[in-house]
Image (cartoon, coloured by chain):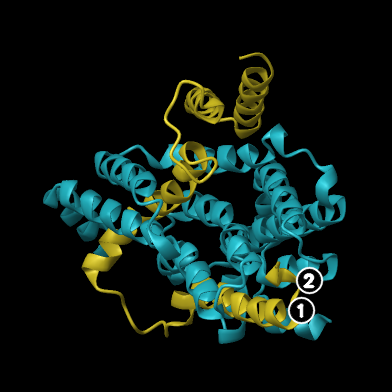
Amino acid sequence: MTKLRETLVPPLDPAGWREGLRSMVTPGIAIAAWGVVTGVAMVKVGMSVPLALLMTIVVFAGSAQLAVLPLLVSGAPLPIVWVTALLVNVRFVIFAAAMRSYFSQLTWKQRLFAGYINGDVGFALFLMRFGGAPERGTTFQWGYFFGNATVNWASWQVASIVGILLGGLAPTEWGLELAAVLALVAVVVPMLNRVPVLAGVVVTAVLSVATIHIPLKLGLVISVLAGVIAAVVVAPAHVSKSAHAKRAA
Amino acid sequence: MNATHDVAYVLVAIAGLTIVTIVTRSSFFMLPARINLPERVERALRYAPACALTAIVVPKIFVPNGEPFFSVQNNQMWAVLAAAVVFAKTRNMMVMMAVGMAVFTVLRLYA
């Protein structure tokens, strides 16, 4: 067990770990609400309890799971199922690119594992906490990340299992999924402190609804790309140049 | 006909979905440290997270049942709006979630 832990997890600073645990407690409630919703949704469409449990435990990606459910019900070809999940998950590719410099010192197994457990809220909290850190890849940062990820993982798994076992008993009209939406809004709001980000978010918001009927969830990717391009276009050249100079110094 | 009763089909689907999770989440983590991303990409990456989260959240608010729903009767919209204002003022996630859920519940029951 210790051996496995050392293989998958880098050395963690205890203070960082504790801070990571703490900072995820409130978002954890929202993650749990989201987990219950996903669990209920899986059994409500008719998936058996064992398959639903397996799916939530290993796939561990709420938005992708919900997106492919109707496809699985209709027996859609597997490549379509997978591509849909891939496109819903494209944001994680972006997150990984933004976070990679904090993890490049790890072994490949540790990086693979850290990536697998990285969620939306944890990612945002981490970059808000360490985005301006002069040194990247410290045991404190790893401690924070894994503390965060542990709460995220546990609240998701416990809640989605509860949702699966509750099945049809959980009322859908309570708006439990709204808790998850609110948590993500809380994560986005502090990011909106610069004009380019604001521009990008507005473009993404409009397009994400306008493209909702494009198949395979392609609209998601289109709206993110367009938003990023809008932000880059709006950003005055001198701002990015000075930021670059600061980083190089 | 519900294809989720086809155990083999769902098992293979789950296997592939797990690979999708790992491949997307770990993607850039697996790039060797000596490879640097182009400056232009690094710059764009500063805006990408906010956009990516927006693309997940906004449809959940405005497309509740598969169709865009822009209306004063969209309870989720008011809940999120109230919560966002509270959060911008207090920076307290617990309070903001409580306000959001309360607004939603009141509107659902009485509006």
Residue B7: image tag:
1
Residue A184: image tag:
none
Q: Colour of chain B?
A: yellow
Disc 2 is attached to a residue of which chain? A
Q: Position of residue A228 (x, y in %)?
A: 28, 55
Q: How many marks?
A: 2
Neighbourhood count class around disc 1 (C-alpha, 10 Å): few under 14, some 14–19, many 20 upward: few
Q: Which chain is cyan?
A: A
Q: Are marks 1 and 2 in contact (CB under 8 Å)?
A: yes
Q: Are marks 1 and 2 on the same chain?
A: no
Quarter occupied by residue B4: bottom right
- Amino acid carrying label 2: it is Leu
Disc 1 is attached to a residue of which chain? B
Looking at the image, residue B103 lies above or below residue B19: above
> Circle 1 — which element?
helix
Quarter occupied by residue A38: bottom right
Q: Position of residue A12 (x, y in %)?
A: 67, 67
Residue A51: image tag:
2
User: Quick check: A171 left or right of A144?
Assistant: right
Q: Position of residue A209 (x, y in %)?
A: 38, 45
User: Quick check: A171 left or right of A59?
Assistant: right
